[in-house]
Amino acid sequence: MGWLWGKSDPPKSSDSDPLRDLDPSLRDFLSKESPVKYTPAPPPPAPPPETTTPAPSREAEPSSTPVVPAESLYPDGRYAHLWTSYKSLSAIEAESKSDQEKLLDILEGYKERKAQIGRAAVENCVEEQLAVNDCYDTGRWRDKLMMCRGENRAFERCYIMQSRFLKALGYLSTYSRPESVDEAIQMHADTLYHRMLAQETAAADAAAAGLPEPQFAPILASVSRSTTPAAGPTTPAPSPAPAAAAKKDDSPPLMPETQALLTAETQAALRQRLKGMTPTERELEEKGLVMDAKAARETGRQVSDIIGLRKSRREEGKATVGDTISGWFGW
């Protein structure tokens, strides 16, 4: 007889299993640790499957759940009718901006990129910065007399290398992507920097022990792949004269992408700058310079697009007041 609040008695097979309501992992733990071993009752045989005639295939019906933007607190579709005409504040501001304001935003963003890279590098070097502060506050008097030279050198090198990693990975190279992408690039740059430090420590330990220098995978695989010349219509082949001059001056070779983006004078200055650097530092410096050139080219393309739209409006007779005023000044 069942309880007053129960519908029926449980099946006999489940009565013989006292652990039927426990979590499977807990059940396994008890079966291993309990001194009393028992065999749970086998489950009742499953009923034979019923044969049903397949229903005629129909086209996939669209989901009945209305789509709401990410700003909604109810992703299940409640109040979806209120979001049909929704526009984000950034979209409204972008539509209401004039061409002159758009140009200023593009140029200001390009100028601000260098400052933001510096701030991101300082954030990644917070441990080294704390070490400098601790040295001045609670360090030994000998270190204080030396102006905490070791800690300051570590912080300065961290800042320089983190900036190079951020540039080489394309941090803030474009403003048409979400902030989460640049945050992931910042974290990845910090990971690569500490990997480089670990490799340098392993190489120093091997040299101190008289062992051969260990071989590591390249820090930036994309840079190592791009250093090998690849056949392609867009990659100009370097002339033999500059190559011979580079060998004569013992200058490091440049990537084909660098030769395609930079002028001859800039390439010569870059070779002089790369002479006193380690292979990893050369890769980062060259790749960072390439990404800077790409960012400048992207900024120029955006400016050209805005100027082209303004020119097309004038040709179609749809010039605005701002277009007319800018035409007076030769823009």
Image: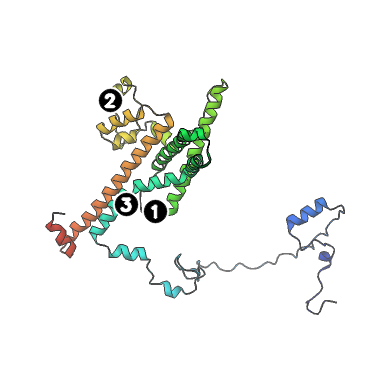
Q: In this picture, is 191 found above or below 253?
A: below
For residue 242, the mark is 2
For residue 177, the mark is 1
Q: In this picture, is 164 found above or below 46?
A: above
Taking depth in this image into account, of 257 and 288 the one nearest to the observer is: 288
Q: Distance between the residues labelled 2 and 3?
A: 36 Å
Q: Mark 3 points at which residue?
A: 109
| First along the sequence among labels 2 and 3 | 3
Q: What residue type is labelled 2?
A: Pro
Q: Where's residue 278, x and y in %?
A: 42, 29
On the picture, is 121 further left or further right than 97?
right
Inspect this view and state whether residue 318 appears: no
Taking depth in this image into account, of 92 and 237 the one nearest to the observer is: 92
On the picture, is 161 further left or further right than 241?
right
Taking depth in this image into account, of 36 and 42 the one nearest to the observer is: 36
Residue at 33% across, 50% down = 112
Residue at 29% across, 31% down = 269
For residue 81, the mark is none
Q: Where's the C terminus, which quadrant?
A: bottom left
